[in-house]
Amino acid sequence: MALPFEFCIEGPPVSQQANKKARRRDWRDAVRSAARSEWDSSQPIDGPVAVTINYIYEDASLDVDNVPKPILDALKNLVYPDDDRVFDLACHKRSSGGKLALPNETPLLQQHAAMHTEFLTGDPDLGP
């Protein structure tokens, strides 16, 4: 089983509501590339999936509800056949300027948090 796995993308996420299609497409491509580099299966999971997103921002920030959709879309046909397989979704937004208080901090999350830069991590796991 290839789950759970974790990946990180440096820089700010792009909202599903971004005006430029090319910007949204480039963001989805970056997410997919980061996920593919950590995904150790040649096939998507055929079952329920839970996803945790940690958005760590510097100055400007997106509304937390605008962060997940492009990420979930980027994982289609890689991690799962369709994002209707996502049964649990948690999206956390925290400032990089202070002490991060995130549930279940992983070594990858701790490593990037220590840099105090803007980044995003994704952590798909098996669902219920």
Image (cartoon, rainbow, N blue to C red):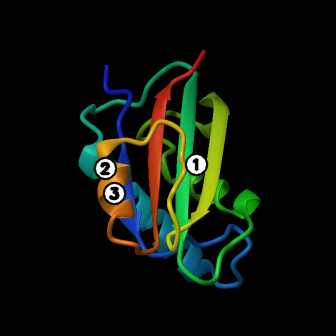
Mark 2 secondary-structure assignment? helix
In the rendered structure, which amino acid carries the disc numbered 3?
A: Ala
Residue depicted at 64% across the width and 83% down the height: 60
Pick whichever, 106 or 69, lies toward us.
Answer: 106
Residue depicted at 51% across the width and 57% down the height: 100
Q: Residues within 10 Å of mark 3 (few under 14, many from 20)?
A: some
Mark 3 secondary-structure assignment? helix
Q: Position of residue 122 (x, y in %)?
A: 46, 48
Query: Which residue bears the numbered disc 2?
Result: 108
Pick whichever, 46 or 128, lies toward us.
Answer: 128
Nearest to N terminus: mark 1 or mark 2: 1
Image-quadrant location for residue 42: top left
Mark sitting on residue 72: 1
Q: Residues within 10 Å of mark 1 (few under 14, many from 20)?
A: many
Q: Residues within 10 Å of mark 2 (few under 14, many from 20)?
A: few
Nearest to N terminus: mark 3 or mark 2: 3
Kindly indicate whether the residue at mark 2 contacts the one at mark 1 (C-beta within 8 angstroms).
no
Image-quadrant location for residue 10: bottom left
**Do we see residue 102 in this rendering?**
yes
The answer for how far apart the CA atoms under marks 1 and 3 are is 13 Å
The quadrant of the image that shows the N terminus is: top left
Q: Position of residue 113 (x, y in %)?
A: 39, 62
The quadrant of the image that shows the C terminus is: top right
Kindly indicate whether the residue at mark 2 contacts the one at mark 3 (C-beta within 8 angstroms).
no
